[in-house]
Image: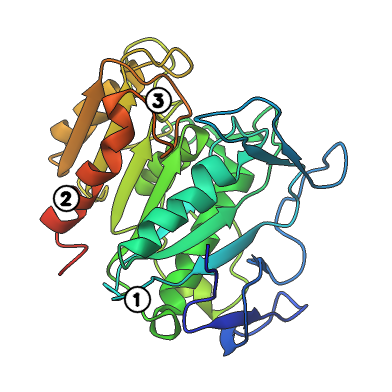
Amino acid sequence: MKLCIAALGLLALCASVQAETLVWQPAAGHTQVPIWPGTAPDLQPVPGPETAKVSEKLLAGKPATAVTNVTQPTMTVYAPTGKNTGAAVIVIPGGGFQILAIDLEGTETCDWLTSRGITCVLLKYRVPSLPYDWRCDCRPHNFELSVSSLQDLQRTVRLVRAQAAALHVDPHRIGVLGYSAGGFLVAEISTNFDRHLYAPVDAADRESARPDFAMPIYPGHLTRGDGKLNPNIPVSARTPPTFLLQAEDDYVDGVDQALVYYTALAQAKVPAEMHLYAHGGHAFGLRPAANPITGWSKLAEAWLHTIGMVRD
């Protein structure tokens, strides 16, 4: 894939948490850019160095790469090829908060988005976080959040919005797309964008963390198996328009995840579109297979046009 920082630049990072807003500067090529100046907040210990492991088993004819032990979260911006539509999508790979499926649910999604004129921002967030680094705030709704990962996502949305002009994107057309655990993060930021999970580090943190649209793909953790919405996902009328996709034979997270979340969105009168397929299982990304669900990207493209986030 042709990789580059949109506007074609890198983040100039300062070591101090009192640094000014991170600024995009011209540079050749691409790089993974740390999203935090200095150490990430609430950093938890991990069992070893960051590693990337390529699977021996093939998925749709190709191996998959898993990244783990992430302690320095990064974002990589992929500029659109051809016409720039002005839209941007932050892509959040899944992996059960233990690994990141960085190609299957990351770079391959950026290939698709950039080919459609959409800026892609690939987020490498902190993992592992077992036992999920859930934090309980027992006032008054009993929130438990995947704190470290959601901190990283909030920060990334704010950075992209703060640097929208340099990235050549519309600050009001910035969305999130996540798979599996990443789909849960999509729901978390769609409903907890106003929760202050970290102390501001620069001017970018004055920006809103609310995405303008959301795409949870075969998401998990949205229900605890009791047919009720996870109380940590407080859907409201301010939840952004949402595109949901899941297979009925997904036995990892279960089709009830999408059903419960869609019901909550409908009750809050949030514009939502849900697609359920009989077959597809879990963790298929965009790789072509015999099941019709692998053509879901066409449905997502049509939806983005319908809600006005992508314009011809």
Gap between marks 3 and 2 measured at Cα: 29 Å
Q: Residue at x 53, y 40 (%)?
A: 104
Mark 3 and mark 2 in contact? Answer it, CB < 8 Å. no
Q: Residue 55 is drawn in which quadrant? A: top right
Residue farthest along the front direction in this orientation: 61
- Give the camera-side residue of 75 and 8: 8
Q: Residue 272 is drawn in which quadrant? A: top left
Q: Amino acid at mark 1?
A: Val
At label 1, counting other C-alpha atoms closer than 10 Å, the crowd grade (few under 14, some 14-19, many 20 or more) is many
The disc, 3 or 1, on the residue closer to the chain's N-terminal end is 1
Number of the label disc, if any, that sits on residue 230 = 3
Q: Quadrant of the C terminus?
A: bottom left
Gap between marks 3 and 1 measured at Cα: 33 Å
Number of the label disc, if any, that sits on residue 169 = 1
Q: Is residue 177 left or right of residue 49?
A: left
**Of discs 3 and 1, which sits in the foreground?**
1
Q: Which residue is mark 2?
A: 302
The percent position of residue 95, horizontal first and vertical second, equals: 59, 33
Q: Amino acid at mark 2?
A: Ala
The percent position of residue 250, horizontal first and vertical second, equals: 40, 16
Q: Residue at x 62, y 50 (%)?
A: 125
At label 2, counting other C-alpha atoms closer than 10 Å, the crowd grade (few under 14, some 14-19, many 20 or more) is few
**Of discs 3 and 2, which sits in the foreground?**
2
**Of discs 1 and 2, which sits in the foreground?**
2
The percent position of residue 15, horizontal first and vertical second, equals: 78, 78
Q: Is residue 21 above or below residue 77?
A: below
Q: Amino acid at mark 3?
A: Asn
